[in-house]
Image (cartoon, rainbow, N blue to C red):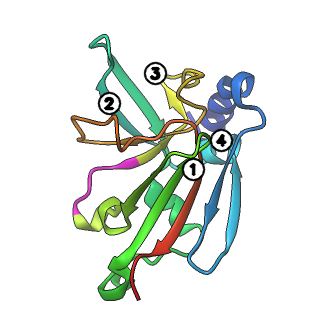
């Protein structure tokens, strides 16, 4: 299946519950980019699986937080050293809930488990109470406090000079 076809299928599945939803990305210099659900679905996708409340297997799928922050100028590769390890991604939900993730924590070069913006769950839209966008962390046994449901914004900030 081609990437374009896969993106179209995911976008169609999500359209009924999230036609007007988007994710705002904000870079360190104030650069802002807003991605629609279709644009998020067109990016490379990563899966994070976990046990649901009823012990069933749940699979969230979406682009990585790291790849999204690169779209607004987050340093990568050899640039992610020294002072740039003081960069943090602040994830914000529609209800005002916020969680910070160190940029190094979500970067694959440091051996991080994937941290994704989930746009689909078990091949369909996320449940209304959870989505349409949700942060999910691979390898995290306890995910409740650091996973964000109803995600609206990712902002890159520096925590110290």
First in residue order: circle 4 vs circle 2:
4
Residue reaching furthest front? 96
Check if mark 4's residue and mark 2's residue have beta carbons within 8 Å: no
Location of residue 64 in the rendering, given as x and y in whole percent from the top left corner: 45, 52
User: Could you say whether the residue bearing mark 2 is in a helix, strand or loop?
Assistant: strand
Q: Is residue 49 above or below residue 51?
A: below
Looking at the image, residue 155 sits to the left or right of residue 22; the answer is: left
The disc at residue 122 is: 3
From the image, state whether disc 1 or disc 2 is nearer to you: 2
Q: Report the Cα–Cα distance between label 4 and label 3.
A: 20 Å
First in residue order: circle 1 vs circle 3:
1
Q: Is residue 115 above or below residue 106?
A: above
Check if mark 1's residue and mark 4's residue have beta carbons within 8 Å: no
First in residue order: circle 4 vs circle 3:
4
Q: Report the Cα–Cα distance between label 4 and label 2.
A: 24 Å
The disc at residue 43 is: 1
From the image, state whether disc 1 or disc 3 is nearer to you: 3
Location of residue 113 in the rendering, given as x and y in whole percent from the top left corner: 27, 50
Q: Report the Cα–Cα distance between label 1 and label 2.
A: 19 Å
Magenta-highlighted residues: 111-115
The image quadrant where one finds the N terminus is: top right
Location of residue 83 in the rendering, given as x and y in whole percent from the top left corner: 35, 87
- Name the residue at 57% across, 31% down: 131
Residue reaching furthest top? 54
Q: In which quarter of the view is residue 22 placed?
A: top right
First in residue order: circle 1 vs circle 2:
1
From the image, state whether disc 4 or disc 2 is nearer to you: 2
Q: Which residue is mark 4?
A: 4
Q: Which residue is mark 2?
A: 49
Looking at the image, residue 75 sits to the left or right of residue 124; the answer is: left
Q: Is residue 98 above or below residue 29?
A: above
- Name the residue at 38% across, 49% down: 115
């Amino acid at each position: 299946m081609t990437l374009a076809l896969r993106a179209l299928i995911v976008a169609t599945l999500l359209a009924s519950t999230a036609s007007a939803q988007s994710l705002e990305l904000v870079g360190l210099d104030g650069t802002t980019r807003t991605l629609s659900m279709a644009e998020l679905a067109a990016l490379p996708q990563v899966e994070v699986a976990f046990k649901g409340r009823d012990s069933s297997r749940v699979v969230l799928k979406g682009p990585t937080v790291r790849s999204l922050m690169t779209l607004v100028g987050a340093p990568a590769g050899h640039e992610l050293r020294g002072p740039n390890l003081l960069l943090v991604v602040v994830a914000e939900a529609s209800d005002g809930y916020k969680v910070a993730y160190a940029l190094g924590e979500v970067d694959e070069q440091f051996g991080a488990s994937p941290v994704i913006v989930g746009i689909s769950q078990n091949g369909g839209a996320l449940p209304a109470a959870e989505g349409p966008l949700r942060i999910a962390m691979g390898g995290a046994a306890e995910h409740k406090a650091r996973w964000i449901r109803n995600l609206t914004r990712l902002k890159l900030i520096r925590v110290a000079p």
